[in-house]
Every structure is written in structure tokens, then in C-alpha cells.
Image: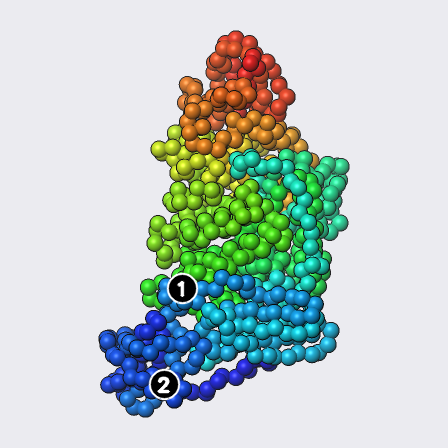
Amino acid sequence: MKKGAEPLLHVIKRSFFSYLDEMQLITILMPFDNHHGQSAFFTLIHAGVQTPLNIIGVIEIENNKKYICSVEEEIIFGNRYWIMNEHGEKTDLQIGAVIRTSAFDESFFYEGELGVSYENSNTLFRLWAPTATDVKLLLQSPVQSVSKKVNMKRCHKGVWEITEQGDLDLWRYTYHTCVNLEWREAVDPYAIAVTVNGKQGVIIDKEKTKKQKRALPHLNQPTDSIIYETHIRDLTIHQQSGACNKGTYLGASELGTTNQHGLSTGLSYIKELGVTHIEFLPMNDFEGVDERKKDGQYNWGYNPLHYNVPEGSYSIDPSDPYSRIIELKAMIDTIHSEGIRVIMDVVYNHVFMRERSSFEKIVPGYFFRHDENGMPSNGTGVGNDMASERLMVRKFIVDSITYWLKEYHVDGFRFDLMGIHDVETMNKVREAADLISPSILIIGEGWDLNTPINPDRKANISNQAQMPRIAQFNDWFRDTIKGNTFNLYDRGYALGNDFYYDAVKQVVKGSIGEHGVFQHPIQTVNYVEVHDNHTLWDKIDVCFPHESDKIKQSRHRLATSLVLLAQGIPFLHSGQEFFRTKQGNGNSYKSPDHINRLDWDARSKFKGNIDYMKGLIQLRKKYPLFRMTDANQIKDMMTFLHVEKPMVAFLLQGEGYEGKIIVYLNPTNKDSGFILPGGGWQLLANEVQAGIKPIHSYAGKNELTIKALSIQVFIQCDR
């Protein structure tokens, strides 16, 4: 037996089994090798009182006879019940599928605060464990080999509470819960600090880590955002990052860093690029990296362990529970000081390992979805799906995002596999964010995943109309521009495939309208590259193995340019602007640093392309016609011009907007001619240069040429 674990309450040999499957419905399994599965009656026993059960159905299932019984007596959760058969044999009444019923959910929904409330004179502990018959709190002193275990009191709605006197700052704690006669030890799901590698919760004084949120530049609308995705370790681990604290929160917050050529790196580089948001891969505590031996280990972080605690492997001192908190808050504060917002990648759709998670240990079977056969569902592909539609799961998600918003001042969330969640939960998340600031971005992966909830309840792209202010990663845009992500050899519009000619017209106007997928452009996150799958460069390299790097770079530039010029929310993967490669690795979630790191030497080598993307970002930020928010605006203000197929050209113009803008796209391998309409025009972007400073001016009607694999952007200058 594990040291500190509780023994079984009753050492019994179960000759048959009984489960509470609804509030007043009990299922009993009698094995055929026990009295041939026969029992004429069953009796419920509690506190010496015997109550007969009413057998309402009998079926044979595998090697058992299954009896379905009703009981008139109300089953009081937290009490222990026994079932006796006609042969005088007894078994314990276990908590079964009842926890997945709406009646259970409504009976035990608790609206109050959970977790630890610390004061220097006492600490209050609250744990939601409605199916437990006993709960104990184990406390351990941080400086002495002193520990104590105390009984918690069952209170309203299945919440267990206890207040411990004295100053418990830095004391460690876990919960021991007894469910179905089995004791389990678990870390508090609401823990906000933990020991190294998350083995125990830690009590802290939040006042010691407080930071005031800085004022940020006003964000009028979601389409004003330009998102730049990166990973804490990737950002600074390269030998030429110039950071002192490589691969850490503090490294990501260092300013003024440069590479060997004196060019900016890290946060200062991102500031110069001009993006509005940095999206970090998961920063909450995750499995996959030993925090004591973090060098030589790597993980993206999609193995969530403790949702409200920063990951320790990015900390200078993961053994100090305060260190990771203070360092992450300092990083976010520094990013804010540069006028940039922070988006947090969150993974509420699954846990690293269901059986070992605090959720499953404390309330077995409740927090995860099960299929029609009672087996855990696996829409996520990692063995478990969080049941967001259940009231206390939804509460946990909303409580958690609220905590990160208020305590760490993050500015948005990217929901991993958002399609696993239900629509109502995601709208509750949006409502909670709005109470703090309507400018908070909520974006997610709205893939349609095979999880057992009704199709019309899934928070996926098909149901985007039910979530009008939540944006979704647009795989239609992605695959139209670069080709199918899961078919490495499929070529998209920017890779010369005119099969996507009609689709490209749809996606550059925000993927809206009769043939689109979204109601409004604020719902689409446009991208061609993320941390997942092959980088754009690596895909192009496979599709065109014999082309010169110069031509490959032109294709890459065209694809990335479309991200920045299309209606919607543009999203860039860090290093995309300097042709990031992962050396052909399409799933680098735990690959070494030399595969995943940002190559700050490439920042020097491809400075010209970086400057080009800076120019397009400036262009997008200056002219609101690239950032429309409403489908009707786009319908009224965006017109496609006649040019030779597969070229595409569109005109942007509108009452109250500065000038007219024309964008030409040439995805072919040859230069093409077109006629620029009459009037005065300034060229702002071509195949080598982009920005708000004019490259050339034109008057009257002109026959012009657009280079192969390039764009041209003009603005009217005679108004």
C-alpha cells in the first residue's frame, strides 16, 4: 500500500455487484457462476434499515444476469448503502451512471467558490466531491517533517469544507477521498500553486504576486488583431537569441536582445514586426517534461495537468511555488509594456491521463464523456473527452478562464479542439470574458470531432452561427491557399493549383455569404501555418523538390501575403516570415530543440522577407478596408474585377473610408498583364516591396505587368 494511503473501509469479496445508475434506479449484476445468476429479490440496507427493491427488468449480459430495480427511498449521497440478495450475500452500492444524469447535475450544481482561500491567520478549503463518503485533507509543512490529516465536513451540494487555523503559507496539501469503498489521493483541481512536477498543491498568499494591469492600445474590433503564435522555449532557446534566460518566461520577456548580426530577436523583434497579439502554446502545468531535468526535454504542452498553475519547466526555479507565478506575470507585464496583448492556448478538451487526473480520482466518471456502452469516449484522440456540457465541468472551465484573466491579465484564449466542447459552454466563456473586457479574443479549433453529444450542440464550425463572437480557425482558408494539410502533396492556389480559383475568392472576403462558412469576418482566423503539421516551407519543399529556393520563397510570400490581406483575423506562426522549417518533421510535439527552435540566424538571412511582411502589416493596420467586421460591409464594399484566370483582383471601397484599394494576385509561374483602371493610383506592394510608402504613382488608365507568384496593391491617390 502506498505510504499515506487509506485502507479499504471494508475488505469484502464481492460475489455480485450493484450500481446506482439513476437517482432511484439500481442495476445489479449477478454472475452466472453465483447461483446461476438467480435471485428472487434484493434488499437495500442503510443504517440497519432494510428496504425491498422492485425488480422491473431482467436481461442477460455477457456472463451476468442484469437486474434493473427501482427504489422508493431517496438515496442520500455521502451515505453508505448495501444490497443483499435472496441468498444473504451482501455487496456495496456503488455510484454508477447516475453521475451522468441531468438530475444528478442539477441536484449538486454548486455556484460558490472552490479551492483554497488563504489568510495569514486561517485557510479555508473547499472541494466538490458529492459521491464521496469521506474526505480528508493532508497537510505538510514546507520546512519541517510535519504533516497532519484532518477530516473535512460535508456541506451543501456535495462540497466538503474545513478551515485550518494559523499561517499556512507554502504548506503543501492533497485530498484523500473515499468513493465506492476506495480511497484515492488527488491534487486540488482548483490549485493555483504546486510543488515541482505538480505532485502536491501548495497554499500561497496571492497578494505576494499581485501586479496591476497596464493600459493597452485600444482594440476596436477582432479584425484589428494580428496574431503571432509561439512557444515559450522555442522563442529564445537558439544560441543566437541573445537572451540570458533562454527557454524561460524571463527569456521571453527580455528586451533589446539581438543576434550576432545586431538584429533584434525575441520580444523586441516581435514588437518591430507590428503584430498585436502573441499567442503562446500552453503555459499551464503539463506532463511530458521533468521540471527538475528540463534540459534535453521538450513538449508543446498539450498534456494538461493543473489548469490554474503555470508550467514549471519555463521557470528559473520550479521548486519554488512562487517563482513560476511571479515570472509568468512579469513576462505578461513586459509584453503589455510593449503594447502587445497575450493569448493563452488552453486545453480544456482532455487531460493527459484520465485515470490519473484529479477529476477522475475525486468524482469518478463525472468529468468525462462516455459512449452508449459506458466506455470513455475518444473524440480528442488521446483517450478522453471532457464533458463540458455538465454543469460542474462548465463551471470549472469558466472559473479557470476567469482566474487567468483577473490574476494574470491575459487578453484572450485559443481553445484547443474546441469542437469537443458544447456551444453553451463556449458562450458562457464569452460572457465571462465580456464582464472583464469585450476586447478579449476567444478563438478555437472548431473541428467536427466524434464525441457523444448532439451535433447541433458541438462548438464547431458547422454551428458557428450560435457563437457569433467566437472566432474559429478556418481550415477552408488554409487548404485553399496552400493545399490540404493532411495530403502533403496537394497544392493550393498559392502553389499554382487553379482548382481553388473559385474558393480563393470566397476565403479572401472572409469566408462569408451564401457559399461561405461564417456569418461575419470576425469569426474567421485566417492562416496557412501553425505549430501543428508541416510548416509552409516544408510543404512547398516537398511539392516542388526541383524548384529554386527563390521560386519557393515567392510561393511562400504569396501565401503569407493572402493571410494578411484577406478579410478576417490574420494568424502567423512564429518564424513563418523567415521561412521557418522543421526539417520535414510534421509532428514535432516532443522533438528536440534543433527542430522546434526559432532560428535567429535565419532572421538575418531573410531580412528582406521580414521587411516585406512588416510592410503588409503596416498596410493592414493603416487601412480599415482590410479589417471589415460585418458581412454586409464586405458585400457592399468588396468587388472582384475582371482579370485573366487564374489571376484574381478585388476592389475595396466604401463611404467614409480613405481611398479605393485594388489587390491583384498572380499565382502562376509567368508574368501577367492587366489594366489598371483610370484615375490616380499609388503602388504600395509588389513582388519585392510592401508598405505604406508609395513605390510608384500612376495616372490615367495603364497597362501593367504583375510578376509571377506575387501580389500588387494599389491605393487611389486623387481624392
Q: Quadrant of residue 206?
A: bottom right
Determine whether the residue tagged by mark 1 lies in a helix, strand or loop: helix
- Front residue of 476 and 207: 207
- Residue 340 shown left or right of residue 380 in the figure: right
Q: Quadrant of residue 29?
A: bottom left
- Front residue of 305 and 189: 189
Residue at 64% across, 30% down: 611
Q: Residues within 10 Å of mark 2 (few under 14, many from 20)?
A: some
- Residue 646 shown left or right of residue 713 in the figure: left
Residue under label 1, please give it.
Answer: 106
The amino acid type, in three-letter code, at marker 1 is: Glu
Residue 390 visible: yes
Q: Which mark is residue 45?
A: 2
Residue at 61% across, 69% down: 124
Residue at 58% across, 37% down: 219
- Residue 311 shown left or right of residue 16 in the figure: right
Q: Is residue 671 above or below residue 359?
A: above
- Front residue of 11 and 425: 425
- State the scheme by which the image is colored: rainbow
Q: Is residue 626 above or below residue 342?
A: above
**Quadrant that contains the C terminus:** top right
Q: Is residue 648 above or below residue 368?
A: above
Determine whether the residue tagged by mark 2 lies in a helix, strand or loop: strand
The amino acid type, in three-letter code, at marker 2 is: Ile
